[in-house]
Image (spheres, grey):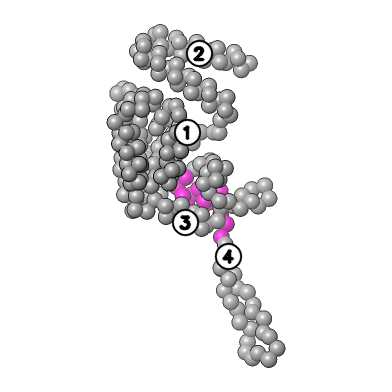
Amino acid sequence: MMLIRKRILPGEKGEPVFVAKREHKLLRIGAAAHELGLHPITVRRWIKAGRIQAVPMGREVRVPRAEVERLVGKIDGRLLVLYGRVSGHGQKADLDMQLERLQTWAKLERKGVATLVLSDIGSGLKASRRQLQRLLKLVCEDKVGEVAITSEDRLTRFGQEYLETLFTCFDVTLTVLEPGEEKTPEQELTRDLLALIASFSGRLYGMRSHKQQALVACAKQVIAEEEE
C-alpha cells in the first residue's frame, strides 16, 4: 500500500489529504512458484506457453499477484487428481512413494481442495490403463481442475502433447512436482524413440529378458555414436 498526497487547490481549506493507492504487487518467479505450490521451472514454462501473464523487468520477469490469485481460484469447486504409475508389480514400493509424495504436497499446497487419488500399474505407452481412462473421462465431464504427477512420464511415455491439449481445452492445470530440465526437440525425439523400443521389445521378448535389454542397450549405443 502506498500513500500519495492530494494537492490542495486554491480556495480549498483544510489539511493535505493522503489517499491510499493500491500497488500492483509483482512477485519473483520463486515467490510465485511457492504460492502456487509449483516448481519454478513449471512457472517459467507456463509463462513461455502463455498460461501465466508476466511483466518483463530488465532481464527478468515478474508475476502479478492477480495472476496467482486467478490460477489458485481456477480449481475451486473441481477435483484435484493425484495420479501415480509404475510399469510393473515389482515397483509397487515406488508407486507408494509417488502417492505419498503427491498427498503430502496436496495437504501443504492445496488445503481444502477435494482430492482424488488414482494409480495404474502398466506401461506408459498403454493408453487403455483403467485409471488413466477414468481420469480422462472426468476431465471431459469438466469435473477436474488440476492433475498432479511426480514426473512428466507418469501419465504417458509418448504423446504428452495430446494430453496437454485436452487439459487446456477443459481449463485443467497439469502440475509436475519434479519437472526435468527443458529438452531440445532432438532430445525429446530420442527419449520417445527409446521408450518405444523398450516397450515394444518388452512385449515381444518380455520386459526383463536378455534380448529386450540387449536391444535397448544397442539402440542407446547407436544414438550415442551419432551424437559424437
**Image mark for residue 219:** 2
Instruction: Give the residue number, with chain letter if any, for mark 3.
Output: 69
Whichever of labels 2 and 4 marks the residue nearer the N terminus, that label is 4
Whichever of labels 3 and 1 marks the residue nearer the N terminus, that label is 3
Q: Secondary structure at mark 3?
A: helix
- Counting from the top left corner in percent of width and height, residue 129 is at 32, 29
Left or right of 40: which side holds 14?
right
Find the distance from the CA under tag 1 to the CA under tag 2.
24 Å
Q: Along the line of sight, which residue is nearer the eye, 130 or 64?
A: 130
**Crowd tier of the residue under label 3, counting other residues whose Cα lies within 10 Å: few below 14, some 14–19, many 20 or above:** few
Q: Along the line of sight, which residue is nearer the eye, 85 or 103?
A: 85
Whichever of labels 1 and 4 marks the residue nearer the N terminus, that label is 4
Magenta extent: 25-38
Instruction: Give the residue number, with chain letter if any, for mark 4.
Output: 23
Which quadrant does the C terminus fall into? Answer: top right
Q: Residue at x 64, y 79 (%)?
A: 6
Q: Residue at x 43, y 35 (%)?
A: 163
194 is within the stretch colored magenta: no
